[in-house]
Image: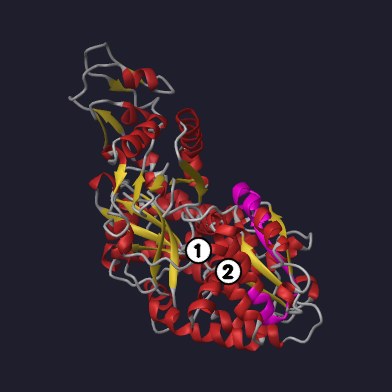
Amino acid sequence: MKENIEIKVGYASCGIAAGAAEIYGALKREIKENNYRVSPKKVGCVGMCHKEPLMELELPDGTRFTYGNLEEDDVSKILVNHIHKNRSYGDKLIPGKSDYDYFTKQKKVVLRNSGVIDPEEIDEYLERDGYTALEEALEVDGSEIIQLIKDSKLRGRGGAGFPTGVKWSFARASDSDQKYLICNADEGDPGAFMDRSLIEGDPHALLEGMIIAAHAIGADKGYIYCRAEYPLALERLNIAIGQARSEGFLGEDILGSGFSFDIEISKGAGAFVCGEETALMNSIEGERGMPSPRPPYPAQKGLFGQPTNINNVETLANVPWIVRNGAEEYREIGTENSGGTKVFALAGKIERGGLVEVPIGTSLEEIIFDIGNGIEGDKDFKAVQLGGPSGGCLPESQLDTPVDYETLTDAGAIMGSGGMIVMGEDDCMVDVAKYFLDFTQEESCGKCTFCRVGTKRMLEILERITDGEGEREDLEKLRQLAPKIERNSLCGLGQTAPNPVLTTLRYFEDEYLEHIENDSCPAGVCRHLITYKITDGCIGCTTCSEECPVDAIEGEKGSRHVIDQEECIKCGTCMEVCPVDAVEVV
């Protein structure tokens, strides 16, 4: 039994952005001023980003209480209630994990320690069987580890879904005295934060997975390629690497096994294309991050011309669990062709956004409605974008689709690295396609003509349509351009760039036609196709006229106001600030 109350504060990037530093500071002050027997601890993201900042109390008898959406003055009230009154503080209390449907349909494998341990303390990782999988792996030949990973049916979580064990076997079979292992932590999809959160919450799981993988393929040098925009993840990685070296898990003759392996961090500058493995290797070598033709593949000739294996963060973090628990148990969690779980960043117009981990094969409906609780504001669901800018948008009719590699591909989307952006009735699907294509067009390295020029031409067509200047023939032009870009682009960025356009055309062609034939945006998003109007519900409070950035609204106090349509820039500020919802889009 613990003598003290242990209090965990969610201290990942999401928590800090929501005010976790202030909550932790208030907690430390309360403990000091009142001499409370309380042990505070910073932990990673538990997944409930929609409830940040979070604080969990564990009483001496093991009972846990979790509080969310906290403000500084809540801290003293929570402590007083638990310590002096022996009761919970009800205003901010979140149901227990066994009762809260946000968690009941999840299965924590990769995120098993995130939100539980202090990610900067290796002892806490060791207390939860950390590095025991490495000890087991070092006792057998690397080929046995590879067979275990093959049997588990672990597939690459970076997007392509290639069988991990098969990929490792290619690198192991390559004949060279020098081999490299790279962890791809260059997470660049809009709305994606899986790898960042995993590193921030449990960096040693990644390191242990990397060391086991290096032993399996025969590598003695590893790199973690992480974007510089992840300062907290990088800080905790550096701490974890230093701790692992001190404990003998990294460096020369690891645990007396005769196997040596060390890890270096390489910072990326934020180029989306560097998530592609050949561009990533060029970047590590100090060259411009541009993809190279394949073959040769990295397993034969990769980093510095030597055999190289590349996996992403989530893939490698699965490995220690598989080694400890066995291939069969892992395989039973997923589907026939894909073992285990998948982590998703659930974002967009979702009521309960955050980081979720579900068995592969879980349906989109279960994730969006059972875990995410549907669309915020009790509005209608329209679509979900999977796989980042390279993925596709699926409509309500596809909500029963299980999240596995083959089924999602058949539906027109991809699993991708795990971004899942939910859209509601207020989203325009033509504008969504334009947004993602604009992203990929901007991030194109420019090496391929079809990617560099083709995506630009597609973007120009979409811009014409959203500006009210589109023609019906434009839809056929989009369909003709897309396969040419897919077939002739050198890397995955260009090969998948048309996906958002193709899936929105496939499922939402009626919205395109509304823009083209009726000069109308049904969602009221595209500025050139909408008009803001003040209704009879106006109370003449003057808020809209005071906030209008171009002074396009006139009216006396107490009387209905009017928008000068010639001056209006369609920014929507009037609608946002109106206290009585008297502004509408027509």
The amino acid sitting under disc 2 is Gly
Badge 1: few (under 14), some or many (20 or more) residues near its Cα, within 10 Å?
Answer: many
Comes first in the chain, label 2 or label 1: 1
Q: Residue at x 60, y 85 (%)?
A: 146
Image coords of residue 172 (percent x, y): 69, 84
Give the side of residue 314 with respect to residue 212, left or right.
left
Give the side of residue 179 with respect to residue 555, left or right.
right
Q: Which of the numbered marks, if any, corresponds to residue 390?
A: 1
- SS class, disc 2: helix
Image coords of residue 352 (percent x, y): 33, 50
Give the magenta-colored segment's residue range.
Answer: 212-238
Q: CA distance from mark 2 to mark 1?
A: 8 Å
Work out whether residue 51 can be spotted.
Answer: yes
The amino acid sitting under disc 1 is Ser
- SS class, disc 1: helix
Question: Label 2: which residue?
Answer: 492
Work out whether residue 473 can be spotted.
Answer: no
User: Is residue 471 depicted above or below 561 in this figure?
Assistant: below
Q: Is residue 464 magenta?
A: no
Quadrant containing the C terminus is: top left
Q: Residue at x 41, y 53 (%)?
A: 432
Q: Nearer the viewer, residue 349 or 19?
A: 19
